[in-house]
Amino acid sequence: MDVEDLYALIPEFICSEGCYECCKNFGVPSRTKVEDARIKKFLKDNSMQPGEASGQTCPYLDETLPEGGCSIYPVRPLICRLYGTSPSYLCRMGVRPVRLLEEDEEEEIFYLYRKNFF
Ligand code: SF4
């Protein structure tokens, strides 16, 4: 299983335009070695440096980007993708995914995540 196969199990979630509330409240997102390597490669390929972590704001958040705030969006880790899509990680701003995951689906995703990518 590739990590993209795992990400594909997560329903689509479209944030409110200009909202980076979650990226400002949970600090540096947790990630596995596989995801960390993807992020490092993405930064290198794009000649980018992560910003400084500031309080609870993610260092990858860049509010100056025209297309959105996450500067590593294509390789953002699982926790960022899962946020808002399951009963355990509901968006505080009330935005909901195309389809909310069932609790057992979320458990399965975490099971596969730990099994394959830790
Ligand atoms: S990695 Fe991107 S999506 Fe995840 S918290 Fe940071 S800015 Fe937000």
Image: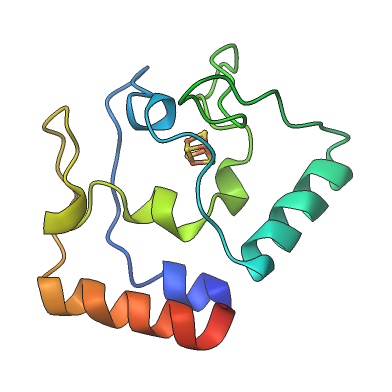
Can you see residue 99?
no
Q: Quick one: 81 or 59, which is closer to the camera?
A: 59
Q: Give left or right: position of 4 versus 41.
A: left
Res. 24 image quadrant: top left
Measuring from the top left, give residue 107's x and y in whole percent.
24, 77
Residue depicted at 54% across the width and 32% down the height: 70
For the C terminus, the quadrant is bottom right
- Residue 7 on image: x %, y %: 44, 67
User: 12 and 60: which one is in front?
Assistant: 60
Q: Quadrant of the N terminus?
A: bottom right
**Furthest-top residue in view?**
64
Q: Residue furthest front?
A: 55
What residue sits 68% from the left and 58% below the top? 36
* Residue 52, placed above or below residue 83: above
Residue 69: x and y, percent? 51, 24
Q: Position of residue 91 (x, y in %)?
A: 19, 38
